[in-house]
Amino acid sequence: PDPDILVNNNGGPPLRDFRELDRAKILEGVTQNMVTPIELIQAVIDGMAKRGFGRIVNITSLSVYVPIPGLDLSSGARAGLTSFLAGVARTVIDRNVTINSLLPGKLDTDRLRGPHEAGTLEDPAAAAARKARISADVPAKRLGTAEEFGQICAFLCSVHAGYLTGQNIPVDGGLYV
């Protein structure tokens, strides 16, 4: 197939101290969060440029700007991806191909809601308290929704975003300014 739109997303490696990472884990994390998205882009970008339309969106993380302890591998690989693609974006914008990254903040998703142990249940009151605690430092005073995130991604994939490229766009309720 010859897609006009590519959205790259990877959940990323688990939280762990960088001292626990051996060479194999480091290479796996860099491959998943940097190399694979680049390879997917390589597979479609020339066709997009030839047809005169393409939208590439990489879903990375706010950790590109504010690294999160324990997610060092994810933060580093995703920052590398965004820097790498900022230059690439400038080479294809003249053929109506854009490359941007979305940096999700605190969104009301299964990953943030937890619990993170498979098969465990959480008391609803404890879950509500955790959600309130997590959203307290967000200027919007709430978590973002998957629908809001999806609408921003859809805009970046549309004909209306043809002059926006090489950008890292936080979707975070004002958390990172």
Image (tube, rainbow, N blue to C red):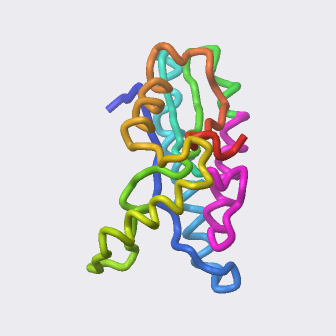
Judge left or right: residue 69 versus residue 121: right
74 in magenta? yes
> Going 48% across and 48% down the picture, which residue do you hit?
143
Total marks placed: 0
Q: Quadrant of residue 165?
A: top right
Q: Residue 49: give x, y in percent of width and height.
A: 53, 20
Placement of the N terminus among the 4 image quadrants: top left
Residue in the picture at 42% in, 35% down = 148
The answer to whether residue 162 is above or below residue 84 is: above
Q: Quadrant of the C terminus?
A: top right
Give 70 or 5, whichever is nearer the viewer.
70
Rendered location of residue 89, percent (x, y): 65, 29
Q: Which residue is drawn at 53% across and 42% down?
A: 58
Q: In this view, does 147 lie above or below 116?
A: above
| 80 over 92 or under it: above or below | below
Principal secondary structure, stretch drawn in magenta:
helix
Q: Is residue 47 visible?
A: no
Q: Is residue 21 visible?
A: yes
Magenta run includes residue 151 = no
Q: Position of residue 37 (x, y in %)?
A: 52, 48
Q: Which of 162 and 54 is in front in this view?
A: 162
Q: Residue at x 38, y 67 (%)?
A: 127
Which stretch appears magenta? 62-87
Asked whether 101 or 50 is in front, the reply is 101
| Residue 51: % across, % down | 45, 16
In the picture, measured across the screen, residue 63 lies left or right of residue 140, that is: right
